Image (cartoon, helix red, strand yellow):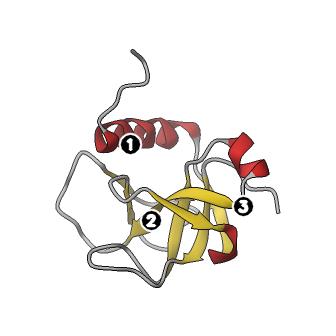
Amino acid sequence: MLIKRGDIFYADLDPVVGSEQGGVRPVLVVQNNIGNRHSPTLVVLPLSTVKKNKLPTHICIRNSKILPKDSVILAEQIRTIDRSRLRSYIGSLDSGIINKIDEAMKISIGVDFDD
């Protein structure tokens, strides 16, 4: 299966510990496409439909054509998963949203790649 940065899949994130996002839920692939082609793992961000406190690491997706409900991408919950956790493909986000997610991840991990 060809997986690209910006793709959203349902993934089974269980088991989890504490406040980690779990269950079968949408995840956004944020790993670069070279890693996506060659690695047995993927770097993803979970999505949630639960209203969360607004943080600079949260990106809201409203009125999406690919998601059944308004969702929040949780860029503070960066996670590496095995490909076997993926279930079904949902769709892909456009570059405008991906740019916002990149900014949220920079905040989350405390780096600025533009320097």
Q: Nearer the viewer, residue 99 or 80?
A: 80
Q: Residue 49: x percent and y percent? A: 36, 73
Q: Which residue is mark 2?
A: 46
How far apart marks 3 and 2 lie (CA) works out to 19 Å
- In what quadrant of the picture does the C terminus appear? top left
Amino acid type of disc 2?
Pro
Query: Which one is in front in this view, the residue at disc 3 or the one at disc 2?
Result: 3
Q: Residue at x 71, y 50 (%)?
A: 36
The relative height of residue 73 versus residue 24 in the rendered view (above or below) is above
- Labelled pair 1, 3 in contact (Cβ < 8 Å): no
Q: Residue at x 37, y 52 (%)?
A: 75
Q: Residues within 10 Å of mark 3 (few under 14, many from 20)?
A: few
Q: Quick check: can you spot residue 86?
A: no
Q: Nearer the viewer, residue 64 or 88?
A: 88
Q: Residues within 10 Å of mark 1 (few under 14, many from 20)?
A: many
Q: Earlier in the sequence, mark 2 or mark 1?
A: 2
Question: Residue 40 got which mark?
Answer: 3
Query: Which one is in front in this view, the residue at disc 1 or the one at disc 3?
Result: 3
The relative height of residue 58 versus residue 49 in the rendered view (above or below) is above
Q: Residue at x 82, y 63 (%)?
A: 1
Q: Residue 21: x percent and y percent? A: 37, 74
Amino acid type of disc 3?
Pro
Q: Nearer the viewer, residue 51 or 41?
A: 41
Callout 3 secondary element? loop
Callout 2 secondary element? strand
- Labelled pair 3, 2 in contact (Cβ < 8 Å): no
Q: Residue 4: x percent and y percent? A: 70, 50
Callout 1 secondary element? helix
- Labelled pair 2, 1 in contact (Cβ < 8 Å): no
Q: Which residue is mark 1?
A: 105
